Amino acid sequence: MKASALQDLLAIWSLASVDTGVTLLTAHSAFREVPSNDGKLEISFKGIHCTASRLSESLPPIASKPIMLPGTRFVDTISLFEPEEELVVDLVGNELVIRNADSKVHLRVHSELPEDELPESTCTQWVVVESAKDFSTAINFLGNTTSQQLHHPVLMGIRMEAKDGLLELRGTDGARSGRLALPCSGTLAPVVAHAGDLSAAAQLFPGKVSIGMDELRLELRDDYTKVRLTVLNGQFPELNISRQTYVPLARLVPKAIDRAGRASTLFDSDKLVTVEASEKRVKLVVKGQELGAFEQVSGRSRLDASFTLNGDHFGLAAQMGEAPILYYRGPPPDPILIVGKVARKECEYWLSPVVLRGKLDR
């Protein structure tokens, strides 16, 4: 077998980075509910909140019986070989022997009996997203808008809901929120899954991906890979504000957004970026340093405004396509809206202005 085929199969081990309960991989001949897949090698594992399996298109089972291996050691060992190298993998006694023309490595097989294969799916609702790449890109962007605070776990997740041919994805940490929709087929009731879990899982699918749910789990799958994630419980915040009440302020340049965000770390211990609009111009200012200037695009003859944003939060907008538009409604506490493109689809990014101590930004 080529090392690349085994390395591709072991890609599911990336989920171990988000589920510390995963230590062992099972190598077996599975997906037995599909007769045509019987006799092919499948790698699977069960963690605390992630379970996954991946079926090879062509590789035969390593042994006549299921075996359990230390996951990190097995994955790292296979990575020692170049993708195009031919490998021979055999079970000899209680050791797995991996060899090529000039190398031989022995791995001890775990003494415990492997767990049962993943049970049949109990998902009752399914949607299909034709581009798993777009789904992954959207999840990665929205993951940056979620919280890392364990005391409110639902804010660590991404909310998904599918209806009317669109899968709406939302992330928030309470101070900012991102929202976009991808075309899909099928329906899905609102469900929240951990952003890190979703990001790791989404990268495993090269083509289209099916997404299903039951009361406890979210499942992503295609013909060869299936991943199950525990859903997050709790009330996900609603975004009770209308975009229709906003006016466009300026068409931004990603390089200037990125420059201002990075400059806020360099020049300001509070990491703040101030947006100043006056005389039909909009400037990005960090500690008196002007990092970008743009023409106003508002339909009004003139709009004077000044507000301050978290530099890291504002810098994320540099990922929103070639010319994201900054929208404005009023002084704090009204949020700021940036509209651009993520995964080739329109994305709304809402940010709460920073209220400076002792005064309100106006």
Image (cartoon, rainbow, N blue to C red):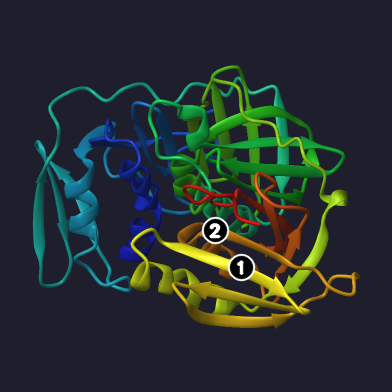
Q: Quadrant of the C terminus?
A: bottom right
Please tell me whether mark 2 sits on a helix, a strand or a loop: strand
Residue displayed at 52% across by 54% down = 140
Residue displayed at 24% across by 52% down = 75
Left or right, 235 with reference to 323: left
**249 relative to 35, above or below:** below
- Residue 27 location in percent, x, y? 31, 39
Left or right, 200 with reference to 254: left
Residue 293 visible, this orientation: yes
Left or right, 191 with reference to 229: right
**146 relative to 237, above or below:** below
Of residues 212 and 179, the one drawn nearer to the viewer in this rendering = 179
- Residue 131 location in percent, x, y? 67, 57
At label 1, counting other C-alpha atoms closer than 10 Å, the crowd grade (few under 14, some 14-19, many 20 or more) is some
- Residue 177 location in percent, x, y? 62, 46
- Name which quarter of the figure residue 49 lies in: top left
Residue displayed at 35% across by 41% down = 18
The amino acid beneath tag 1 is Val
Please tell me whether mark 1 sits on a helix, a strand or a loop: strand
Give the label on residue 275, or none. Answer: 1
Q: Are marks 2 and 1 in contact (CB under 8 Å)?
A: yes
CA gap between label 2 and label 1 equals: 8 Å
Of residues 10 and 270, the one drawn nearer to the viewer in this rendering = 270
Q: Quadrant of the N terminus?
A: bottom left
At label 2, counting other C-alpha atoms closer than 10 Å, the crowd grade (few under 14, some 14-19, many 20 or more) is many
Residue displayed at 82% across by 44% down = 242
The amino acid beneath tag 2 is Leu
Question: Earlier along the polypeptide chain: callout 2 or callout 1?
Answer: 1
- Residue 100 location in percent, x, y? 18, 67
Say which residue label 2 marks. 309
Circle count: 2
